[in-house]
Amino acid sequence: MQSTNPYTTDVLDSYETPTDDEVEAAVERAVDRFPAWADRPVQDRCRILDRAGDLLEDRVDEYASLLTREMGKPIEQARAEVEKCAWLCAYYAERAPEQLADEVVGTEADARTLVSYEPIGPVLAVMPWNFPFWQVFRFAVPNLAAGNVGLLKHASNVPGCARAIEDVLHEAGVPEGAFQSLLVGSDTVGGLVEDDRIRGVTLTGSEGAGRAVAEQAGSELKKSVLELGGSDPFVVLDDAPVEATAEKAVTARTQNNGQSCIAAKRFVVHTDVYDEFVGAFEAKLDALTVGDPREESVDVGPLARPDLVDDLHEQVEETVEAGATLALGGEPPDREGAFYPPTLLTDVPRDAPAATEETFGPAAAVFEVESEAEALELANDTSFGLGASVWTADVERGERVAREFEAGLCFVNEYVKSDPRLPFGGVKESGYGRELARQGIREFVNRKTVWVQ
Ligand code: NDP
């Protein structure tokens, strides 16, 4: 397995992939380790996770530069990702004991009834490259705190991050076997999902990968959590402050070089502010600095792999062929690296790829609507249901609209983001189950009813 810098196109490193016997030995190690890890007091496990957070904090620059080298994330955003992982460790170290404590229900006067939350064993995590630290930590930390043991199959283009995460968790005190990274391709996942010893599987990635894993997990009657793509609407109502909203729209679309499941992808704008918003949005997108992601001043770096540029360009071209207007960008630059320019599509037909598919790069699709009702109808007219935001001067109106969104994460006057304290996940084809918070930490546990008469 190789990791390649998408900016320089240099091969950074090569990694041995494990043999079938080595994968088997790793699963066995996980099974062997589970009882002892699960039996430790939750506070002990949390102390170790807290230490992992301290180590991340001490090495923010080292890990940030690894993220930037391996998948092209602008360095400032890479630092923010590592810092957020450190926060997540500290948060669960403090809160997991309470989130996992017995819940006394009290059904009858003469009985003690409660729910206890008990770990289930080895859980497989199939993770993507777009937030190579965050996606893994947000699986690993709550699950390790709950007493499960983890097996990571990270995306094939970020093996360096996979190794670094495994190392830092071990250094913090997570025992060998309680968290292991398997540098395997996606063709190994099926066998692992089928394996009785693996008690659950979580996947973050594309709809196709999600369907493959869900199908298998279903046939094995195995618990799964899926966090798939999104085509989040960003709804600008007629009373929104246009300039400030356009500023947020740029970040919402181009963060992480546009490669985020919760990036705003469809901009649904009321006709009263349409021209002003589109003008401001275009000017701000055009003013972004595209280039070397190691430079502090760079807003948009390369996409993580050359094939992702090809996929995005095809979606943009097909959207224009379907009748959209290309207001900005739309042509990969003639330079080294997997670059795609900030791109603005207006007059986008509702059946064009930029309207119906997830666009994973800095390309925004804008739609004009005549009313709040039409905005909501268009926002919900998608097979996805991950996040959605609405922008207005009237917060009560905003909350009313937000509650009408068919999505898992609904924001008013803020772009959609993940937060260790709040559950994260979607509805419809964006997946099912939740990560993070009380809801997430209780996904891969036996929510056991105990009745003592
Ligand atoms: P994938 O969904 O292919 O990759 C995500 C993870 O799933 C990787 O670890 C990958 O392994 C694994 N995987 C892929 N196919 C299977 C399968 N059939 N069975 C089991 N595991 C599988 O994403 P891509 O990197 O190909 O990106 C394609 C598109 O997916 C993006 O353009 C975007 O639309 C979406 N995506 C969404 C993400 C999100 O955050 N929701 C994150 C990443 C992508 P391997 O790397 O070895 O192929």
Image (tube, rainbow, N blue to C red):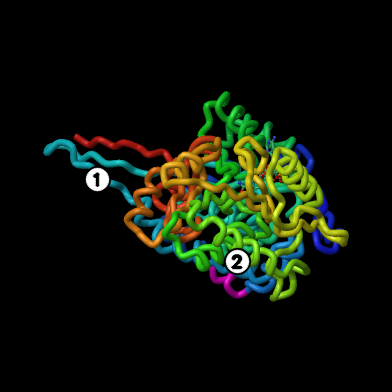
Q: Please report the residue visible at 56 percent of the width from the left and 66 percent of the height from the top.
A: 247
Residue 195 higher or lower than 235, as above or below: above
Query: How far is mark 2 from mark 1, CA to CA?
Result: 37 Å
Residue 430 position within the rendered picture, expressed as x and y whole percent measured from the top left: 55, 40
Of the pair 155 and 243, the residue shown nearer to us: 243
- The quadrant where residue 450 appears: top left
54 in the magenta segment: yes
Asked where in the image residue 300 lies, by quadrant, the reply is bottom right
Q: Position of residue 180 (x, y in %)?
A: 64, 50
| The residue positioned farthest toward the left in the image shown | 109
Instruction: Point out the tag, 2 or 1, that comes first from the N-terminus.
Output: 2
Q: Secondary structure at mark 1?
A: strand
Is residue 395 rendered to the left or right of residue 202? left
On the image, numbered disc 2 is attached to which residue?
82
Q: Which mark is residue 261?
A: none
Q: Position of residue 279 (x, y in %)?
A: 61, 62
Give the answer, above or below, for where 267 lies relative to 373.
below
Q: Which residue is mark 1?
A: 104
Looking at the picture, which amino acid does disc 2 mark? Answer: Val
Seen at 71% across and 48% down, the residue is 155
Q: Please state the extent of the stretch shown in magenta in the rendering.
A: 52-58
Q: Is residue 254 visible?
A: yes
Question: Which of the pair 406/30 is nearer the observer?
Answer: 406
Residue 84 drawn at (x, y percent): 54, 65
Depicted 53 relative to depicted 45: above or below: below
Determine whether, in the image, residue 48 is placed left or right of residue 215.
left
| Residue at 57% across, 41% down | 202
Disc 2 vs disc 1: which is toward the camera? Answer: 2
Q: For disc 1, does the CB lie below 8 Å from ligand 1?
A: no
Indicate the amino acid at tag 1: Val
